[in-house]
Image (cartoon, rainbow, N blue to C red):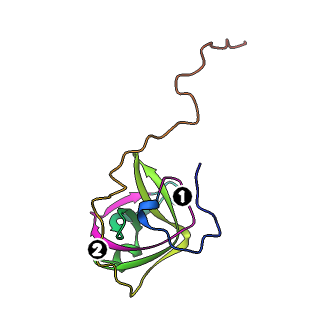
């Protein structure tokens, strides 16, 4: 499992993102906002609003998951500084997420051009299972 060092203080560019990276710092621009949907989380059993924002920089782009109040705070064209981000795979597609202790803030920097041709969320990744789905070749008999 690959990850970025926990003491990383420099910003990473979007093209360098890979699955299972954590403790990331990025500066990205919102290119597009997806449709909002309501989900019921297993942990809190509450309804939450969620959407995916297409974000990027000059090197590439990816999908960023935004929750509840984050959706209202940001709009298309905003430049964001993301701290304590991590990457996951959702149905084989790379997603950028913000950790609970992380933050997303608007910044006054300017990103003129976003490379949407290098969309990392469109690349399909194979997820490897940590167990063998076929099962054991020999079955144990139950003792009575």
The main secondary structure of the magenta stretch is: strand
Residue 119 placement, left or right of 143: left
Q: Residue furthest right?
A: 143
Quarter of the picture holding the C terminus: top right
Q: Is residue 125 magenta?
A: no
Disc 1, SS? loop
Count of numbered tags:
2
104 vs 50: above or below: below
Mark 2 vs mark 1: in front: 2
**Disc 2 residue crowd, few under 14, some 14–19, many 20+, Cα 10 Å:** few
Find residue 91 and report its horizontal and vertical position in percent. Answer: 39, 46
Residue span colored magenta:
18-40
89 vs 73: above or below: above
Find residue 90 and report its horizontal and vertical position in percent. Answer: 42, 50
**Disc 1 residue crowd, few under 14, some 14–19, many 20+, Cα 10 Å:** some
Find residue 125 and report its horizontal and vertical position in percent. Answer: 42, 44
Q: Residue at x 53, y 36 (%)?
A: 129
Inter-mark Cα distance, 2 to 1: 25 Å
Identify residue for label 2: 113
Q: Residue furthest bottom?
A: 108
Name the one closer to the observer, 47 or 13. 13
Q: Residue at x 54, y 58 (%)?
A: 21
Q: Quadrant of residue 22?
A: bottom right
Q: Quadrant of residue 34?
A: bottom left
Residue 131 placement, left or right of 38: right
Name the one closer to the observer, 142 or 20. 20
Q: Is residue 21 magenta?
A: yes
Identify residue for label 1: 21
């Amino acid at each position: 499992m690959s990850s970025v060092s926990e003491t990383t203080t420099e910003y990473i560019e979007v093209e360098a993102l890979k699955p299972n990276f954590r403790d990331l710092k990025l500066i990205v621009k919102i290119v597009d906002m997806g449709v909002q949907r309501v989900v019921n989380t297993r942990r809190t059993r509450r309804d939450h609003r969620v959407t995916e924002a297409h974000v990027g920089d000059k090197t590439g782009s990816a999908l960023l998951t935004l929750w509840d109040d984050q959706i209202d705070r940001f709009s298309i064209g905003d430049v964001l500084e993301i701290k304590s981000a991590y990457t996951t795979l959702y149905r084989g597609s790379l997603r950028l997420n913000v950790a609970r202790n992380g933050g997303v803030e608007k910044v006054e920097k300017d990103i003129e051009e976003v490379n949407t041709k290098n969309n990392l969320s469109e690349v399909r990744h194979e997820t490897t299972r940590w167990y063998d789905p076929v099962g054991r070749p020999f079955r144990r008999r139950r003792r009575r």
